Image: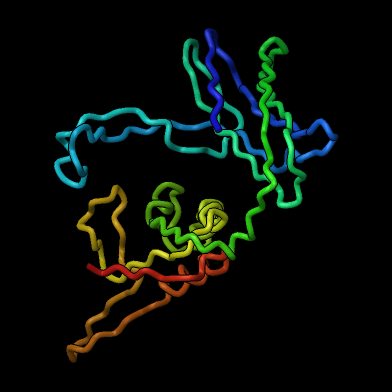
Amino acid sequence: TQVLIWTSEELKAIHLSPGNLTSDAGDIISSDNIRATFMRYVMANLLGDRETGCRDVTLLDTVLVADVITNSTTLNFSPKTSRPVWLSIDIPSNAKPGLYYGTLNICGDDEKQQQLLNYEVHVSEHQLPPVHEWSYHLDLWQNPFSEARYHQVETWSDAHFKAMQPSMQLLANAGQKVITAVLTEDPWNSQTYDKYHSMIKWVKKRDGTWEFDYSHFDKWVSFMMDLGIDKYINCYGM
């Protein structure tokens, strides 16, 4: 769920700190299972009445969208501004059903700059099986080249894989089944902000035959499989 913070004055170093969830029976869900982080705005194309935005994006209007769930728990606020907070709760499989009560502490350097927001969570009797047993077919495309640009690291370096681990682990935890692999250079003619490069190096030799280097492809697929995304590999080469 989301929380909205609004301020009429300048607030410096506002920090988010969730507390434990507690039921009337005294059962506790630890705050270790709760994340409260700020959201960041990005510019997006407003499609309006158009059915697709794949072409003529220069003709589309733009709009600010609260889209990126950051890892930041601290933020400075300018007067008369607002910011969404994303509150995410991972209910343990052994949690007892019932109504739980929680608090989100929003505090700054000044003791007066503190708000305590109360909320409730209803834990049902239903229990999901482990993620690897889910039958739902989730296929969200991944773009490792976008991650490299965002984190300013060399593609396929150790730093690149380290930077991708948190987001790809979130994807695995959501039940992702498919690894996105690209076999040719820029198969979608740069329709995406960061174009996809070939994960296989194609080398045409002097005698006219072809040689293929799968080292990047293998590293990428092995990395994803180690995170638990190991049911399918979708290979694109249009």
Q: For residue 91, what is the image quadrant? A: top right
The residue at the point 55 percent across, 19 percent down is 5
Residue 101 locus on image (x, y percent): 73, 29
The residue at the point 16 percent across, 36 percent down is 58
Q: Is residue 142 visible?
A: no
The residue at the point 63 percent across, 54 percent down is 128
Which residue is nearer to you in this view: 182 or 102? 102
The residue at the point 51 percent across, 70 percent down is 230
Residue 190 locus on image (x, y percent): 23, 54
Outermost bottom residue: 207
Residue 105 locus on image (x, y percent): 69, 24
Q: For residue 162, what is the image quadrant? A: bottom right
Outermost front residue: 125
Q: Is residue 175 visible?
A: yes
Q: For residue 204, what is the image quadrant? A: bottom left
Residue 133 locus on image (x, y percent): 59, 65
Q: Is residue 152 left or right of residue 47?
A: right
Q: Is residue 170 left or right of residue 90?
A: left
